[in-house]
Image (cartoon, rainbow, N blue to C red):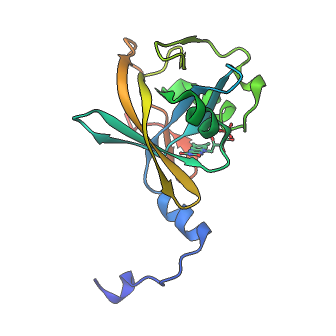
Amino acid sequence: MGDDMKQPIDVSAGEFRHAMSHFATGVTVITSVDEHGEPAGTTANAVTSLSLDPPLVLVCFDLDSLTLRAIRSHRAFVVNVLAAPQQHLSANFARRGLAAAWEGVRHRRGPTGSPRLDDVLAILECTLEHSLPGGDHEIIVGRVRHVEISAIASSPLVFFRGTYTALAG
Ligand SMILES: Cc1cc2nc3c(=O)[nH]c(=O)nc-3n(C[C@H](O)[C@H](O)[C@H](O)COP(=O)(O)O)c2cc1C
């Protein structure tokens, strides 16, 4: 590694966030059911495929997330993969625990009871397999029980350098 690539040992939260913002991701809304039976959901891009056999995904949640609390009690959740025209859903579910966030959001309950949002690119319906510590986040590992892929050939919503973008055509 050349001298110009040497990094300081201490990295501030801002520097870390800025560096990671260069890792382009898709955008999902993770949905579940809270302890009162009401739908819960949050926007998340810390989502990855973990294992093929068994099929596992992982999602990282801020420890304060109300959706995390819902998943701990409901023990199931849905990964809703957003399409490019669904930026408004990403913004909507980035608001903390607002029941009002569900007003006008078309959805239906899947086999585990968690909400499936209409017109998303893909749905992965999961049961809670493990939860692991991850600093100020918690790593939720879900076992994928059902999948559904949209018939509409839409491009994905992409998050890059702190802003929404689209794939170059
Ligand atoms: C594009 C984007 C990606 C996000 N990714 C995550 C994530 O992976 N994990 C997380 O805990 N919060 C993430 N957030 C922030 C949450 O959506 C936000 O804190 C939300 O208010 C939490 O809601 P809740 O407390 O009702 O669960 C993201 C926000 C945006 C806009």
Residue 88 shown left or right of residue 47 in the figure? right
Query: Could you say which quadrant of the image residue 144 lies in?
Result: top left
Residue in the picture at 65% in, 43% down = 65
Residue 134 picture location, percent across and down? 50, 57
Residue 14 picture location, percent across and down? 61, 67
Residue 69 picture location, percent across and down? 63, 38
Residue in the picture at 43% in, 48% down = 24
Residue at the farthest left position: 53
118 vs 144: above or below = above
Residue at the farthest bottom position: 3
Residue in the picture at 36% in, 32% down = 143
Residue 163 shown left or right of residue 156 in the figure? right
Residue 121 picture location, percent across and down? 43, 22
Residue 97 shown left or right of residue 49 in the figure? right
The foreground one among 99 and 25 is 99
Query: Could you say which quadrant of the image residue 115 lies in?
Result: top right
Quadrant location of the N terminus in the rendered image: bottom left
Quarter of the displayed picture in which ligand 1 can be seen: top right
Residue in the picture at 76% in, 31% down = 98
Q: Is residue 81 visible?
A: no
Q: Is residue 100 visible?
A: yes
